[in-house]
Image: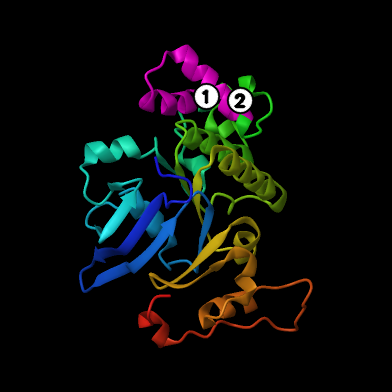
Amino acid sequence: MAASGDPLLTVEDLWVRFPGRTRVVEAVRGISFAVGREKLGIVGESGSGKSVTGRSILRLIQPPGQVTARRLMFDGIDLARIDEAAMRDIRGRRISMVLQDPKFSLNPVMTVGRQIAEAYLIHHKAEPAEARRRALDMLAAVRIRNPERVFDLYPHEVSGGMGQRIMMAMMLIPDPDLMIADEPTSALDVTVQMQVLAILDDLVSKRGMGLIFISHDLNLVASFCDRVLIMYAGRIVEVCQAARLREARHPYTVGLLRSLPRIDEPVDELQVLQRDPAWLDAPAP
């Protein structure tokens, strides 16, 4: 177990490539970063490499995709070097991932309670009765009213917001050290979105977990996370404290911020981001 203050995850020189008929697409290009017991945001436009970065940490990139890294250290274990059996022991139990639009990642022919209990049984030697109790406790932890009733529902019988919470319960029940949340609130209205974020914030602080929060919403990340990585074309172009995101200096980050409407600073016309080819190969921060 990583000591308090030490990074849970250290990524050095991560590359993700997808060979095509005419060329190799480099989705992630030599990025390096570390995550402690904190809320780390990764933001950028669609196609910037955010989700691919999260999936590559858990080795979820399927062939012909190719993932290489100088180091991919998690609590003293190099994830890039261990075999698949060892990776399966880490995936889910110690590092979990909530996928984008997670309700549709649930099995439609199994009750949600059975799916959460199964996630516990996979990683713990326990009786079904204990798994059921743990699942009910976790449904209560993600602030679902009447867990007994929801336990026996099927995914199509729950709302989008409840589906997000159920998926979070499933990912949290093994008690992971690190959670990767890939746009977990993108399909929710603002009220439900804030409720889900409050749950994540509460669980991260109480459990001492690390959280990688992938999003395209700069305002959301600035208010929720501790630090932010800004990605462009598969590279990290800037790193800053979330609370000081509006003081960012890279032209790409500045352009993204200026393209957002603000109530306190209304403008007649929002700016359009002007890209510079030099950003593609500029030195990493």
Which amino acid type is shown beneath numbered disc 2? Val
| 230 relative to 282, above or below | above
Query: How many other residues sit within 10 Å of disc 2, few (<14), some (14-19) or many (≥20)?
Result: many
| 240 relative to 205, above or below | below
| 281 relative to 165, above or below | below
Tell me where residue 14 sits by quadrant. bottom left
Q: Residue 113 carries which label?
A: 1
Is residue 110 visible in this depiction of the protein? no
Percent position (x, y) of residue 140? 63, 28
Which portion, as a residue range, is magenta?
Answer: 113-140
Percent position (x, y) of residue 281? 35, 81
Query: How many other residues sit within 10 Å of disc 1, few (<14), some (14-19) or many (≥20)?
Result: many
Percent position (x, y) of residue 217? 59, 63
Is residue 194 visible in this depiction of the protein? yes
Q: What element carries label 2?
A: helix
Residue pictured at 48% horizontal, 84% vertical: 275
Q: Which of marks 2 and 1 is nearer the N terminus?
A: 1
Mark 2 lies on residue: 150
